[in-house]
Image: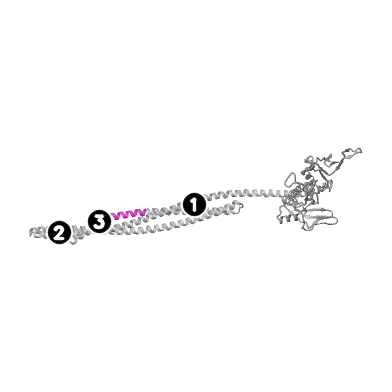
Amino acid sequence: DEVKTNATAASAAPAPTAASAASAVSSDDSNNAELEAELKTLKDTNKGLESEKKTLEDKVKILEESVESLKNSSGEGAAKMQSQIVELKQQSAQLKQQLEEGEKDAAEKEKKAEEKEEAAKQAISTLEGKLKEANEAFEAATKDSKSMFEGKMKQLSEEHAVAVKNAEDKHAADIQTKEEAMQKLREEMKAAEEAAQKAQGSLGEEKKALEAKLNETTQTLQTTESEKKGVEAALAKLKKESKETFERCDQLIAEGKKLEGEIETHKATIEEWKTTSKKWEDLANHNARAVLEEAQMRKKLQIELMNYKGNIRVFCRVRPFSRKEKEMNAIGCIRTGINDWTLQLNDPKKDLSGAISDDWKDYSFDHVFPNFPAEKGNQSAVFDETKLYAEVAMSGQNTCIFAYGQSGTGKTWTMSGIKGDPVNEGIKPRMFRELFKVKEDQKAVYDYEFRVQMIEIYGQKKKQQLRDLWYLSEENAKSKKKVSSKAPTKFPEYKGAELKVITTGKKKKKTFIKAAKERRFTTYEDMYEECTSAEQCRFTRATGLNDESSRSHLITIVHIRTVNKKN
């Protein structure tokens, strides 16, 4: 009975467990094959990446050689190319670092994948061993149990048959005993079946544990596959960046070749410019010599012209009637002569009968400026005859323009004119402008410096006074007194330094005013503005012809210092 019970338990449902184990082993083999294929693909990709890296390093090396060859060139293009190459080197270094990190990351992931693969293989191998042992034990137990069960069943059937036969032969009581034994055997068989079901449950738990390990292995493979995809994406990005870098390298190389051509062109242009510059320099030197010679000749001719016209030239200017003269219906007593240097003055005479007759007398001058027609006697015509003295003064000769006449005859008008009126400005502002014009024309040969003194002479005979208008102008500026457009009519007290006229030398005399202030000017505008402002400090008084007639003499002295640049 004991043997029969064990056989029943061992023979319970072996087929499902063996089938499940075989299925798990088959699934593991398939996953391992896929993992090996993916690892192989990853290794091939890494090899391709290493090949691309080597190609990039070769191109960078070629580019560095190109840079070394371009270093010998000059120009802005080479500097720009050098800057771009440095930037490319930095990009290449960054790319190289990214490649190394990618390779390192890929190697680590490949190592982890190999470790996981080895662990999976070991787990699968262990699982296969356990399944194999379980199947062998199950098959052996099933075979032995079946044989023993069949033997025992056969033996039991024979014994049962003998027992029945004996029971029939002997007595019916034995049948009851045997039936009880059969009932007991059924109970044992039921217990054996429950034990077999329990054993089957234990095998199911082992199957679930194996399936859990299989699922874990599958997840590991999936994780490895995901990491592989990440590596492939990184490799694709690196490939794209490498391609862009290579294209940029090719573009820079092309630009470098273009710059080399431009540098050669610039070199040729520079050489041409050097040749042209040498020609211009020779021409400039020639022109400077010519200007110097022309200036010397001009000076000589000016002296000859002055000697021809006379060192002292006397002009006569006829003014028009004033407003008061027109109101008086005055009659003119001057008329132009037969040429530009004569005029006639009427000096009426009475005869014996008392009749008055005109008596026109002729007077000659170096030039006469009539009041009609206007173009022959206006401010511009007067300056045209006097501007020669500006060039004479610039050549080193002492010159003087002196306006004289009665009060109200137009001396100040002729010398100063109206400020800011280009038509009616006088000789002095025009002469200032001419001095700076000559300075500009001769700047290649001469340096000029202009210093100005402004002196007023007031009084007559014994009571005369020299007044420095620069001093008076400075005093007005210190006291912040607003300069009037009208000169003062009340003679002010003069507190400046005492001015004295000094004459030195015997053969070549030189006259100067001691203690007089000087002002240096570098532009026409400054000279004109300050001199005009200083003139407002002159003393004036109304006369019968002029409400603001100058009651003093004004001397404007321009000292000219000349330096020859070539000597």
Q: Earlier in the sequence, mark 2 or mark 1?
A: 2
CB atoms at circles 3 and 1 under 8 Å apart? no
Q: Earlier in the sequence, mark 2 or mark 3?
A: 3
Main secondary structure type of the part rendered in magenta: helix
Q: Is residue 263 visible?
A: yes
Mark 3 and mark 1: Cα distance apart in space:
61 Å
Q: Is label 2 in a helix, a strand or a loop?
A: helix
Taking 75 as reference, is 6 above or below it? Answer: below
Q: Is 152 on the left-hand or right-hand side of 454?
A: left
Q: Is label 3 in a helix, a strand or a loop?
A: loop
Q: Is residue 82 magenta?
A: no
Mark 2 and mark 1: Cα distance apart in space:
87 Å
The residue segment tinted magenta is 13-33
Q: Quadrant of residue 114?
A: bottom left
At horizontal 89% and vertical 40% (from top left) the residue drawn is: 349
Q: Is residue 61 visible?
A: no
Taking 196 as reference, is 421 above or below it? Answer: above
Q: Count up the numbered dots.
A: 3
Q: Amino acid at mark 1?
A: Ser
Q: Residues within 10 Å of mark 1 (few under 14, many from 20)?
A: many
Q: Earlier in the sequence, mark 3 or mark 1?
A: 3
The residue that label 1 is drawn on is 242
Q: Is 280 on the left-hand or right-hand side of 175?
A: right
x, y percent for residue 248: 52, 50
At horizontal 35% and vertical 56% (from top left) the residue drawn is: 217
The residue that label 2 is drawn on is 183
The residue that label 3 is drawn on is 14
Mark 2 and mark 3: Cα distance apart in space:
27 Å
x, y percent for residue 300: 81, 48
